[in-house]
Amino acid sequence: MKGTVLVTGGAGYIGSHACVELIEAGYSVVIVDNLNNSKHESVNRVTEITGKPIDFYPYDAREKQDLTEVFQHHSIDAVIHFAGLKAVGESAKIPAYYYDNNLNSTLILLEVMKEQNVNKLVFSSSATVYGEPSTVPISEDFPLSATNAYGRTKLFIEEILRDMANADKLNQVDSPLKIALLRYFNPVGAHKSGRIGEDPNGIPNNLMPYISQVAVGKLDKLSIFGNDYPTRDGTGVRDYIHVVDLAKGHVKAVDYLLHMDESKSECHAYNLGTGHGVSVLEMVNTFMQVTGQTIEYRFAERRPGDVAECYANPTKANNILKWHAEKNLEDMMRDTWRWQKNNPKGYED
Ligand code: NAD
Ligand code: UFG
């Protein structure tokens, strides 16, 4: 066994895939998730895929006593903090809820980690912290900004984590914080078993689940938001990354932090993307080609806040974390469709 990783938000879309990859890489995992955007069934299915039992706590990461109890029951070597709210539109309507949940869960977690002498943390950040990038591909040293409350929670948490790691350096603490800020581009796809995947509540905001729900007959028609962007076919370009590749990036980040010099403090950001931009029309056409399904679509107005192009320069993660994305667009489509087709109602089936 390589060590024990506490995974907050481990019942969610990315967290559940990360748990599978961690277990398969030889880690044991402990999950804390209050199930506010997920179902316990995802944890059962991670157990089913890996054949390993998982310690699951249905706790809110803002509850200090509960979190402390988890650290006291397990010898935690590192933490991956996925727990957070992530809907951009909702964050504009109820920003206080987003700031409370995302910031306070992180602050409480840091407090408990300090008290329990755990100093390795991987944080779920997002390409959203680049705001409206002036050029692509985007490197980690690009200026940071945010265009919505959700994005600001990620930006503020990144700043808090940098301050905390710096403080440990200034105070010359024995085991200072070692932090990896992982900036995800656009996670899509599902585990190849078709047993875990993305299960959004209500009508999906994101492109991939929208396409797959049109294919399965839950939704009528995709609206493509804008066909007049200065891109190769006029539709928005993003860096779609297979969720299993993304999950493996977390394993690499944990490996990296666990092998660092214990006396060193660090807080670095890494882009997790493929480095390739794909347009909305290319996504739709590839999905149809790979799955044989027809996707009805129409062109609609641009969605406010969307940028024309966003894709990563992932060189830093390639070089330092020794990670790179391996799966291609066809894998993303095939795996999304297997999950959607086998679980038309998500985890309710
Ligand atoms: P998700 O909603 O599926 O998973 C988040 C999990 O955190 C859920 O299971 C939810 O129940 C749990 N949670 C939320 N608040 C909690 C709290 N206070 N205490 C305990 N559990 C709590 O989302 P996801 O897509 O798996 O995203 C995981 C992380 O990655 C989030 O922080 C998200 O902001 C970030 N991220 C996601 C994307 C994306 O497109 N999916 C992109 C960039 C960053
Ligand atoms: N799109 C459509 N129709 C839809 C949904 C999306 O045309 O029904 C288009 C968008 O306009 C955009 C592309 O598909 O051009 C991708 O949109 P998504 O909503 O899937 O993803 P975004 O890039 O807008 O945002 C996602 C997450 C954010 C995160 C960001 C960067 O939703 O939380 O990636 O990681 F911050």
Image (cartoon, rainbow, N blue to C red):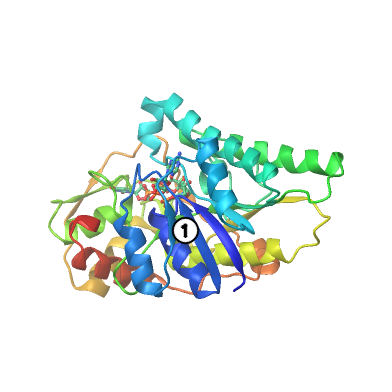
Q: Kindly identify the residue that appears in the image at 23 percent across and 63 percent down.
A: 340
Q: How crowded is mark 1: few (under 14 residues within 10 Å), some or many (20 or more)?
A: many
Relative to residue 31, is residue 73 drawn left or right? right
Left or right position of 113 against 169: left
Q: Name the residue under label 1.
A: 239
Q: In this view, does 19 lie to the left or right of 264?
A: left
- Residue displayed at 45% across by 43% down: 307
x, y (%) of residue 247? Answer: 49, 64
Tag 1 secondary structure: loop
> Height in image: 193 above or below 32?
below
Any part of residue 125 in sight:
no
Residue 48 picture location, percent across and down: 34, 71
Closer to the camera, 343 or 142? Answer: 343
Camera-side residue: 199 or 272? 199
Look at the image and tell me whether residue 140 can be seen. Answer: yes
Q: Quadrant of the C terminus?
A: bottom left
